[in-house]
Amino acid sequence: METDQPRAVQQDTSAQQNRPLEIDTLVVGGGQAGLATSYFLSRAGVEHLVLERRAALGGAWQDRWDAFVLNTPNFSLDLPGMPYTGPEPEAFMARDDVVDYFRDYARRIDAPVRTGTDVTWISTSDGGFTVETSDGGWQARNVVLATGAYQIPKIPALAAGLPKSVLQLHTHDYRSPEQLPDGAVLIVGTGQSGGQIAEDLLAAGREVHLAVSMCPEAPRRYRGHDILYWLLQAGIHGPEYGVNALTVGQLPSPAARFACNPLLSGTDGGHDIHLRELGRQGVRLHGHLEAADDGEVTFTDDLPERLATVEAGFGQRMGRALDAYIAAAGIDAPAALLAPADEWLPVASPRVNLAAENITSVLWATGYQLDLSFVDIPVLDAWSYPRHVRGVTEQPGLYVVGLPWLTGHYSSIVGGVGVDAEYVAGQVAGR
């Protein structure tokens, strides 16, 4: 990977010893949301600084495993001021290329970035904000939270009931099959990471057990385009045609903002992931993991129902939304091709003895917990999600960009984050 950084901003240590430094706007987080916001702030002439806790830019993509491939196509890397213009718009970037892409973007837009700076506390002060960091304090008139939602790996409490002889890793820390001891692997969770790592381990000849969650399967290509094409088009432009299904106001509950993304992969040119097909290839499928005790794990005895729910999920909500947009916009797209019914069922036991099955490691593909605990301002709801309207929180001068479902399905996607970033930057500039 390239290591060159964008414009670095040095700390004035002598002044810092006496008082906090002052700035108009601080952007917390140097991932896609923070950089997109910086682009629009610069265009508006707003003095600002982007603080990134990692030692180098590249965001959470640096935390992915070695064989990770972006599951959104290159054409969706539509960053503000730098749309993808390469020769392979339908291809999928590998992890290191994705990291380099964001570092190149920061250089091109000359983003004022300070890396290795962890924001530890934000509070209100004299009409602005006091911001404490691992590298000293600031006084800012505005603060934009652009941390994303992938701060704390979620591991269920039942993990404590697993034998100490079994290696446990969250997918955040998984890098390659060689990292795991010999023996079978239990993956808990079938979101995008769980499904893709199951394929990674299967290709390496490992025996894999997979605890199935409710993340829906989805087609890689739908009605003539990659599914991401339609998701971005319908999410961003759907309201123009009265189609609002992919906007935050249509979610069934606030908790749905954290629902898992559909099972898809960008490896080998991009493909669907079907759990029954993984089962036919040798992956041992199980229900939801609900207990662990004395070397045994217990799963729910509802695998057939789970598989049916996973397979029906796309058509019940997302597929209907895309079809409604295509019809409302008058787009001439091929008809949807329905997948043939698949009635294959694995033999699954609700109780598994880890030693008997030679399961020596457990991978928790259980997602992340949003952590904005450093924000000492009463703007967070019961899910620790900022209360806001289009990224403008209840506290004047405090904004948020890049969270899942901030305004729509596209809000945390590379190709869509610029929509919210532009609006928020405009609000900052007009304040």
Image (spheres, grey):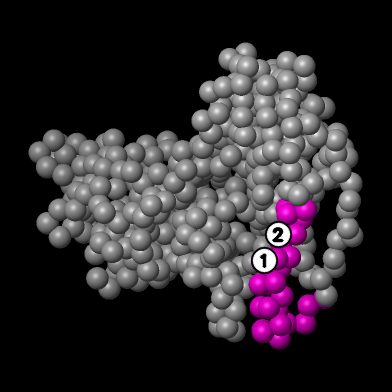
Q: Whole-percent x and y of residue 195?
A: 71, 42
Quarter residue 187 falls in: top right
Which dot, 1 or 2, sits closer to the camera? 2
Quadrant holding the C terminus: bottom left
Would residue 228 appear left or right of 379 to someone viewing this image? right
Q: Residue 35 versus residue 3: which sits nearer the camera? A: 35
At horizontal 57% and vertical 50% (from top left) the residue drawn is 101
Q: Whole-percent x and y of residue 194?
A: 67, 40
Would residue 344 appear left or right of 195 to someone viewing this image? right
At horizontal 30% and vertical 43% (from top left) the residue drawn is 374
The answer to whether marks 1 and 2 mark residues whose Cβ atoms lie closer than 8 Å is yes
Does residue 160 show up magenta in the picture?
no
Residue 351 visible here: yes
At horizontal 76% and vertical 49% (from top left) the residue drawn is 305
Q: How many marks?
A: 2
Quarter residue 74 falls in: bottom right
Q: Amino acid at mark 1?
A: Met
Vertical arrangement, residue 234 with respect to residue 256, above or below? below
Residue labelled with disc 2: 313
Residue labelled with disc 1: 318
The magenta segment is 308-334
